[in-house]
Amino acid sequence: MESDRTKVALIGSPNSGKSLLFNRLTGLNQKVANFPGITVDISSGKSLTDASTDYLDFPGVYSLQAISGEEKLAVDAFRRALETGQLSAVVCVVDSTRLEKGLIFALQVIETCRRHSTPIVIAANMVDVLDQHGMQIDTLGLSAALNVPVLAISAKTGMGLEHLAPCTATTSAPTEPFSIASDIIASDDSLTHRQAQQLASTYGPKGDLLINAQTRLDTFFLHSWFGGISFFIIMYLLFQSIFTWAAPVMDAVETLIQLVAGVVLPLVPAGMASDFTADALFGGIGAFLVFVPQIFVLTLVVGMLEDSGYLARAAVICHKPLRLFGLTGKSFIPMLSSVACAIPGIYAARTVDSPRKRWLTYLAIPLMPCSARLPVYSLLIAAFIPAQKTLGGLVGWQGLAMFGIYVFGIVCALLVTAAVSRSSVEMRSDLPFVLEMPPYRLPSWRPLLRNAWNRSKHFVTKAGQIIFIVTVVIWMLGYFPNQGASLGDSWLGTMGQWIEPVFAPFGLDWKYGVAILTSFLAREVFVGTLGTLFGIEGAEENFVSLSQQIQDSGLPIGSGVALLVFFAIALQCVSTLAVLARETGSWRLPTQLFISYSIFAYAAAFVAFHLVEFFV
Amino acid sequence: MTLWDLKQGTSATVSAFKASIEAGYRTRLSELGFHPGELIACVMAPSLGAPKLYRVNNTVYSLDDSIASMIEVA
């Protein structure tokens, strides 16, 4: 039974190595990143060594006296777990290379656990780093002083972890308050500070631990010239990787789909079954599967940047420019994550501790060019922009167009936050910029690859489900009542004709109207729907690329640009709206954003269509 | 002098917080190590007014002008 299970909580400051320890103990694929505050939900996992024990990974907090909303959620959850007696024990993870800071937090946790009669163990993590520097921590002395077990461990190498489970199982709750502490929680921070300082200087490692290499790298990466140049090179490589590294795999997936279609289609009996397989399965779902490699590469590269410690430096570089637009350097990580997907971006925005800046970051996130827009952009660019190169073959027009539409999305996001931050009446409290700089390190590949794989799998299974259902429904509406004889006379055709006037100002016919409507579920559905519609209409026996079919349909370039602009702005993602509602606690912001961005998108697309038609 | 005025490569001891600082933030800065009596080094002061990097014990934090100018050093 669930209630019989032993629950052990892991709690610690950001960057104390808590999530890595959790992964070690449970073998779970929880994401570990080198950016303060990456754990945003409480993860739970079964112990690898004892099947009756669950470890709970609480979000990293600097203190039990929360000052931001995100911290308050985490601290409240921890307190509730203690109050309801759910926890068999607490493991407080401290970074032994920064013992004083860790102990300020540990003293608060020890006192809180004592009040709730819950056993606590201090895990002094990262002793491998101490070893490298020939230093050590006096765990026995510290344990005696605190009257709580202290274990020297390394989540990275696995050192000392075998003692953790037996220790949490046998230790009892602290009974006496810490000797020099009268009442630690009672906001006497200077007393706690003095105690931690005294304990750290008596039992902690003696000497200078901050690796000089970190300062040297910071001098380079934050240099006024080299820092700026390297920032742009890294961002350029990020976007290049999405297209150049993923391109061969995308081609391979497309070829594979064609091959499978070539083998499967002749085996399916002619008629409705064959039409369904060709149009809905290969046309609709095949069109969307091609983009999975890009999502994999993007997640991998963003994860690599996080893990290396560079993203925290990028936040420092971006702070001043982003402040011009009402944001903060901390908004950079959620905004960059949103280039992969708005949903991790929204979660990452919890690290923006200022409520006002976080709210503004939420406004920017849906406008960031997410990977779900990528299939739509790729399709339209392939259909409208010639695959030619300029400047002696160095710059491709298609790549340039992609870069342009990405920049357009980012500029829209910044302009919206700049305008809203200057005119908004939303009086939300503001907090200043304080960010811990994690040490630089080489990314650990296995968790990163696993994370990229999970994200891609999630994309295929979750988005794939919606796309499959939509594709089947669209196919049926388009195929009946006349068995695909004439798409215009189908149920879908009739519906399309009702909405045609809405999109007629952009020169789009009803097929695009239907595809846009369905894409309000998720943007990539646009490609699947259009693939299905063209499939039914064309009655092609072979798998013909959708961009080719769009090209052949003679759609004007102004309509193509209008579609690009529309997709860059409109908030067509049910999941984003739902997650935003959950994060902000109400449907108010998602509703406001949905309506205003739809109007904005429509107006901008209208202007774009007429501008292009005027000049081209 | 405030922490924000500290030049790159120099150190100073925190003497006090400005009275206008919010209580919650004063507590947090103390917990992070920015505490009266603590020696703070400015390890990096990027140009163009970007947040500066300060070292406390073995940790480096980045603080922008709005908060670093709330901490008085001597």
Image: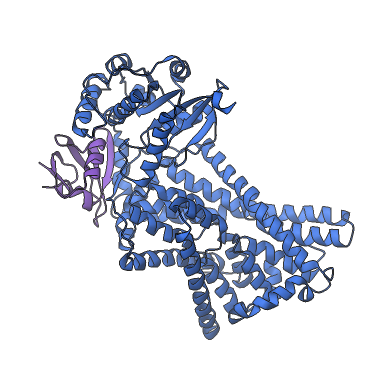
Chain colours: A blue, B purple
Q: Is residue A194 among what the camera can see?
A: yes
**Front one among A88 and A287:** A88
**Residue at 24% across / 54% down in the picture?**
B47
Residue A251 in percent (x, y) is at 66, 55
Q: Residue furthest right?
A: A269
Residue B38 in percent (x, y) is at 17, 34
**Residue at 53% across / 80% down in the picture?**
A612
Q: Is residue A11 above or below residue A122?
A: below
Where on the picture, by quarter, is residue A321? Answer: bottom left
**Residue at 38% across / 36% down in the picture?**
A15
Where on the picture, by quarter, is residue A414? Answer: bottom left
Apparent side of residue A491 relative to residue A314 in the rendered image (left or right) = right
| Quadrant including the C terminus of chain A | bottom right
Apparent side of residue A574 relative to residue A283 in the rendered image (left or right) = left
**Front one among A146 and A380:** A146
**Front one among A255 and A574:** A574
Residue A48 in percent (x, y) is at 55, 24
Residue A153 in percent (x, y) is at 40, 22
Q: Residue furthest front?
A: A84
Q: Is residue A436 above or below residue A329?
A: above
The number of callouts visible is 0
Q: Is residue A318 among what the camera can see?
A: no
| Quadrant including the N terminus of chain A | top right
